[in-house]
Image (cartoon, rainbow, N blue to C red):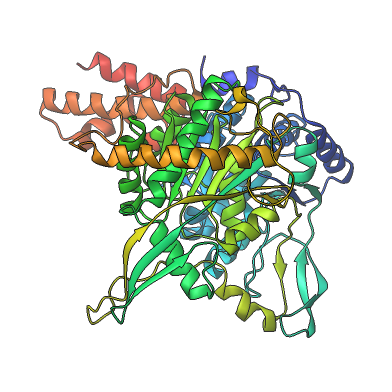
Amino acid sequence: MGSALRAEASSPQTNSRPLRAWQQAALTQYEEQSPKDYLVTATPGAGKTTFALTLAARLLARREVARVVVVCPTDHLRMQWADAADAMGIVLDPGLTNAVGPVRAGTQGYVTTYAQVAGKPMLHAARSTAVKSLVILDEVHHAGDGLSWGEAVEEAYSFAARRLCLTGTPFRTKPDERIPFVRYEEDTFEGDDGERGVGLVSRADYTYGYKEALADSVVRPVVFAAYTGTSRWRNSAGEVVAASLSDAGTKSVEMQAWRTALDPKGQWVPHVIAAMDDRITHLREEGGMPDAAGLILASDQDDARAYAKIVRRVTGKAAELILSDDPKASKKIERFATGSARIAVCVRMISEGVDVPRAAVLAWMTSYRTPLFFAQAVGRVVRSRATHESATVFLPAVRPLLTLAASMEEERNHVMPPPKTVQGDELDLEPLPPKEKDADGLTQWEALEADARFAHVLHSGTAHTGEGSGPTVVVAAEDEEFLGIPGLLTPAQTAELLSKRDDELRLRIAASHRADDGDFMLVEDHPDEDDAGRSWRDAAELRREINRLVNRVAAKTSSPQAVVHTQLRQSVPGPPSASASVDVLRARRERLRTML
């Protein structure tokens, strides 16, 4: 059955999963108001994709729209959206490029990226107005990433019939980066100098925060395990400086101590990786999550590669190394999401929107510290599948990260404060790693060594050290191997256990350093999965097969490939392969087979 027939035969209103209460409430509100613009703010993992596609299916079924256009941040998310839509009987093409004009026949729309929209906004404007369209702007805060993206989105979709904006973290701090199609209201803010001024705050049409999602068991509770340690580095004057992560003094010293701790040559990284691996092992063997996995976020690709080697040395297992410049990155994410690998190391590839439900542990080994990135990254490990599951985030015990962790349950809006408060705030958003050498080739900073020690567990905004203050924590012998899940052990007991494990982990790391590294594969290669049966994947595979057959026909007949393509289109009329329907592509494939 062709894609078009299959899409028509399957009811787009059906959904294999029942809607959550918030999704149903938001749909009811939307249908009562029937707005042109609608903004949903929902915590990562709450199910924004399901909500959006259910709404799209209803609008398509009632013929209130004839096309669905999804705009998302990355190419991998294009495929994720297309797969989710396909499961609901909506055929969206994730491979449509700016070089192809019309939307492919047999589809009900396409998925693109903000970068592509910025490349040719007028092309996307033509596509979204050729027929009545619903434009879904996923993680719409990206439309505030610089004026060019925001202006392009506004230019492309100002005249679309309907616009649905989705975000889990709708906040920015720059007053000149207002997000298109989002409603703002004035609000009063108090600056660092005590002066009050008027700024702007976004207003969502429907909000579903982490606190509500936690109460509904939609997301997992999060325990933050903070690790301190002493970092030693050499500054530009050649002096050796030592500072504790949790008591670094000035922001500059804190940042350099933090960056030194993240250096792959030190002891902080392997120690925390060992603690992370212990947590994964417990979740798999005792915690009811036999497929539990962990994510390591690195600052850059060099660190990511080094961390993958440390994972292999400490755990004895190869990590899945996922880098943005790897053409197989999307396949690796899919493989990790559905496979059995324990740990994936990446930079930013799976920090936002990517669905890996089995990931329940996160190691924060990056110098990024914006509220936006923090919320999105932690959102990768909070998606709940069962009520007993929890998430654990291992992080450096530095003030900026502990502040973000303590405010996880706060609702956030897109805030644009008065200009006076912006200047100071922006400096505290995202630190750059210290440069090792300046323009003259002089050393500015050199990491020497760093150790790691468990500091405390942060749960619901409260720190538990597991030692010293408060009543004695009693942990049963059978729980000694347990890294606490909220509700089974208290946060204080969790802290006590992590503290007790420190010495054992330190011995384990020392042993791993003595072992011979040798040469090993960083990533285990797996056979490619069979993608047959997925409508948008059918078209992509058919196009590849046609190109292979054209090459064979051209070789057999000694004709140029362009001539064979022309003959093929004359024999099987229709648009070029890039925008042809599955039925046309199949007919062309059969025609080519007869020519061999």
Is residue 169 among what the camera can see?
Answer: yes
- Residue at the outermost left position: 558
Residue 270 in the figure: left or right of residue 255: left
**On the rendered image, what quadrant is the C terminus found in?**
top left
User: Number of callouts in the render?
Assistant: 0
Frontmost residue, 382 versus 391: 391
137 vs 261: above or below = above
- Residue 289's quadrant in the figure? top right
Residue 123 in the figure: left or right of residue 371: left
Is residue 104 among what the camera can see?
Answer: no
Residue 61 in the figure: left or right of residue 448: right
89 vs 126: above or below = above
- Residue 197's quadrant in the figure? bottom right
Residue name at image x 74 percent, y 50 percent: 409
Residue 4: x %, y % from top left? 56, 23
Residue name at image x 61 percent, y 44 percent: 379
Residue name at image x 63 percent, y 62 percent: 154
Residue 360: x %, y % from top left? 56, 34
Residue name at image x 34 percent, y 59 percent: 449
Residue 271: x %, y % from top left? 42, 44
